[in-house]
């Protein structure tokens, strides 16, 4: 009984290292393509990149906005009931603003985008792989990484920070609604307290996290799509795998960046 468990654990570890290696190779290839385009002063396919930006925004904006608005309300309710016991109800604005901008907005936005956009990228590229469209690009002399991967990475690195800014605003608005209509606080006082509590490091750190999360989501979605082998049923497995791996890696990256940015 022990040996099967050891073999299973070993296979999992080996698979994790193989996944990281595959992502690193794809990241290196995409980086070389972007660097080569900049050195030759050839623009990245901006039309495709902007299309991917619109797709990411359109697919994720309503859900991201709703979730962050509700999370801001929940956070304000939870914190206010506790802080009121200590006569510190005015600190609700500080807690909501800092928690949303530093952590909740970039993390929850990335998780929503992983489910909405990362899965779509894996499904699109996986379908192209099954239909041999990727091989057709190679035959026509078109580099798949430049044509398929780079625009999606650029699009996500534009869309995710923009969505995070919107999430910051809506999270704070959610806390404001609870503070005003449940605890009878002044909206002006709440907003002033929120702005006084925030510093550039809070907002900038959240946007930096969003940028790193965008790279993770784009790379995982593309890598999972390119790794599809076999029939159409493999596309579904790749899509599910892309979402799971993306969420796990986003949380790992979030932990590492939080330790670097805020653990002093």
Image (cartoon, rainbow, N blue to C red):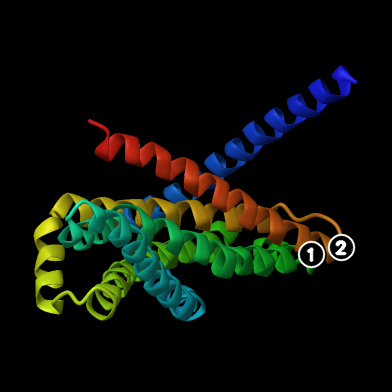
Label 2 CA crowd tier, 10 Å (few <14, some 14–19, many 20+)? few
Q: How far apart are marks 2 and 1 (CA)?
A: 6 Å
Q: Is residue 12 above or below residue 170?
A: above
Q: Position of residue 124 (x, y in %)?
A: 66, 70
Mark 2 or mark 1: name the one nearer the start of the chain. Answer: 1
Q: Can residue 264 be seen in this view?
A: yes
Q: Which residue lies furthest to the right in this view?
A: 1
**Which residue in the protein does label 1 denote?**
130
Q: In this view, does 105 lie above or below 55?
A: above
Q: Residue at 86% x, 18% y: name it.
A: 2
**Which residue in the protein does label 2 denote?**
231
Q: What element carries label 1?
A: helix
Q: Can residue 27 be seen in this view?
A: no
Q: Which of 229 and 162 is in front in this view?
A: 162
Do callouts 2 and 1 mark residues in contact (Cβ within 8 Å)?
yes
Q: Is mark 2 on a helix, strand or loop?
A: loop
Q: Nearer the viewer, residue 61 or 15?
A: 61
Q: Residue at 55% x, 52% y: name it.
A: 247
Q: Quadrant of the C terminus?
A: top left
Q: Where is residue 140 in the image (x, y as percent from the top left)?
A: 65, 67
Residue 31 is left or right of residue 184, and the answer is: right
Q: Where is residue 223 in the image (x, y as percent from the top left)?
A: 62, 52
Residue 195 is left or right of residue 2, and the answer is: left
Q: In this view, does 32 lie above or below 152?
A: above
The image quadrant of residue 114 is bottom right
Q: Which of 117 and 35 is in front in this view?
A: 117
Label 1 CA crowd tier, 10 Å (few <14, some 14–19, many 20+)? many
């Amino acid at each position: 009984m022990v040996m099967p468990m050891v073999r299973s654990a070993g296979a999992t570890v080996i698979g994790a290292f193989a996944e990281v290696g595959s992502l690193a190779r794809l990241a290196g290839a995409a980086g070389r393509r972007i660097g080569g385009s900049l050195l030759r002063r050839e623009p990245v396919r901006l039309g495709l990149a902007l299309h991917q930006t619109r797709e990411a925004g359109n697919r994720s904006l309503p859900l991201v906005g709703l979730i962050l608005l509700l999370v801001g309300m929940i956070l304000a309710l939870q914190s206010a009931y506790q802080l009121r016991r200590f006569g510190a109800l005015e600190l609700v604005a500080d807690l909501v603003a800092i928690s949303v901008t530093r952590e909740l907005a970039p993390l929850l936005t990335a998780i929503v985008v992983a489910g909405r956009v990362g899965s779509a990228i894996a499904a699109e590229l996986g379908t192209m792989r099954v239909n041999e469209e990727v091989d057709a690009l190679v035959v026509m002399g078109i580099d798949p990484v430049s044509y398929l991967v780079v625009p999606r990475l650029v699009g996500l690195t534009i869309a995710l920070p923009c969505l995070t800014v919107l999430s910051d605003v809506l999270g704070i608005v959610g806390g404001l609604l609870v503070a005003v209509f449940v605890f009878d606080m002044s909206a002006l006082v709440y907003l002033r307290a929120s702005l006084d509590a925030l510093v550039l490091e809070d907002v900038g750190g959240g946007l930096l996290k969003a940028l790193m999360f965008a790279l993770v989501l784009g790379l995982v979605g593309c890598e999972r799509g390119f790794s599809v082998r076999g029939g159409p049923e493999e596309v579904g497995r790749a899509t599910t795998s892309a979402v799971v791996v993306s969420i796990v890696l986003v949380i790992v990256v979030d932990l590492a960046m939080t330790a670097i940015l805020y653990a002093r």
